[in-house]
Amino acid sequence: MARVAIVIVTYNSASEIGGCLDSLSHASDTEVVVVDNASADETREIVRQKGVRLVASAWNLGFAGGVNRGVRETTAPLILLLNPDAHLETGLEALTGRITGKVGFAGGMLLEEDGRPQTGFMVRNLPTPAALAFEVLGLNRLFPWNPVNWHYRCRGNNPMTPGVAEQPAGAFLMFSRSLWLELGGLDERFSPVWFEDVDFCARAMAAGYQGAYEPAAGARHTGGHSFGTVGVGIRHKYWYGNLLEYAGKHYGIIGFRVVCLAVAAGALLRAVIELPRHGFKAFQMYGGILRLALARFFRKRTKDNTAEGEMCEKSGGRE
């Protein structure tokens, strides 16, 4: 039996998946499965040409659903989530060596095209209510060196030094199968994408596990290819909706409501700022986010602080 199962979830990834699969020559003792979420391009054809196992879904399972499907299709004790736009530069021995005892998950170094580490993205601390509020209000972009953002994006960490990591990026994330089983997999309510990896790490830490960062394992990463043809309004709907879902699931009532109000205020502010460029469409785009944030603010919270019905409505069921 292979030691590592590499699970790659694709959606219109034809421009990246070939290079990603070729890069797996760096890794040994692995089994590989590609779960394709109903791509409309040549992704599946390329995977078949490479001779890699393909699970071709008839509909979009979302990233979490695709990961869970891929893990169920494999048997290795360790799982590596690898985005199709993340191409391995090294073997996986250093990363697998970090998964031991209570270290249940680990991430490696993600590199820009020019070889620079993707600091601020590849490893973060779990977001606090303040971090998400600053994010949606644009304060982290306007004042990137503020202490809240500094802590959230681990700006003080040396990217060449191994260490503890609360939230390695899901683009290059390894975890044990036993942890995945204990947590019940990734939460598929975070559909189709965003915050499912953050939620997984948060739940792992709440269960007593630690995360690690290992720079000796590296992958070159471009990012965002699957949403290149999706409208800004749709991207915002998913990102803000899943951000609110995460806040509702992991924060107390005060922190959650602070995030809701920050999302509402940030959406209104962005609509005003973008009015000269987009006209009334700016209010159409951000008005839905404003309404969603206020609805979540006033909605009675369930026992687990989630709103499953709302997530299904937001995502239109299975994508």
Image: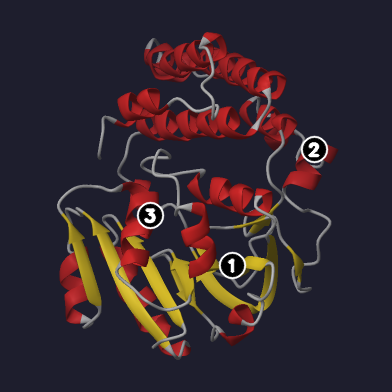
The secondary element bearing badge 3 is classed as helix
The Cα atoms of the two marked residues, 3 and 2, are separated by 29 Å
Instruction: Please say if 11 is above or below 243.
Output: below
The reply to whether callout 2 and callout 1 are in contact (CB within 8 Å) is no
The Cα atoms of the two marked residues, 2 and 1, are separated by 23 Å
- Assess disc 2: are there few (<14), some (14-19) or many (≥20) residues with their C-alpha within 10 Å of its C-alpha: some
The residue type indicated by label 1 comes to: Leu
Q: Which residue is mark 3?
A: 225
The residue type indicated by label 3 comes to: His
The secondary element bearing badge 2 is classed as helix
How many marks on residues? 3
- Where does residue 90 sit, x and y in percent of width and height? 55, 84
Q: Quadrant of residue 143?
A: top right
Q: Which one is earlier in the sequence, the residue at label 2 or at label 1?
A: 1
Q: Which residue is mark 2?
A: 148
Q: Image point 65% across, 24% down: which residue?
A: 137
Q: Which residue is mark 1?
A: 110
- Where does residue 97 sit, x and y in percent of width and height? 64, 82
Q: Which one is earlier in the sequence, the residue at label 3 or at label 1?
A: 1
Instruction: Please say if 288 is above or below 119.
Output: above
- Where does residue 83 sit, x and y in percent of width and height? 43, 63
Could you tell me which quadrant the N terminus lies in?
bottom left
- Assess disc 1: are there few (<14), some (14-19) or many (≥20) residues with their C-alpha within 10 Å of its C-alpha: many
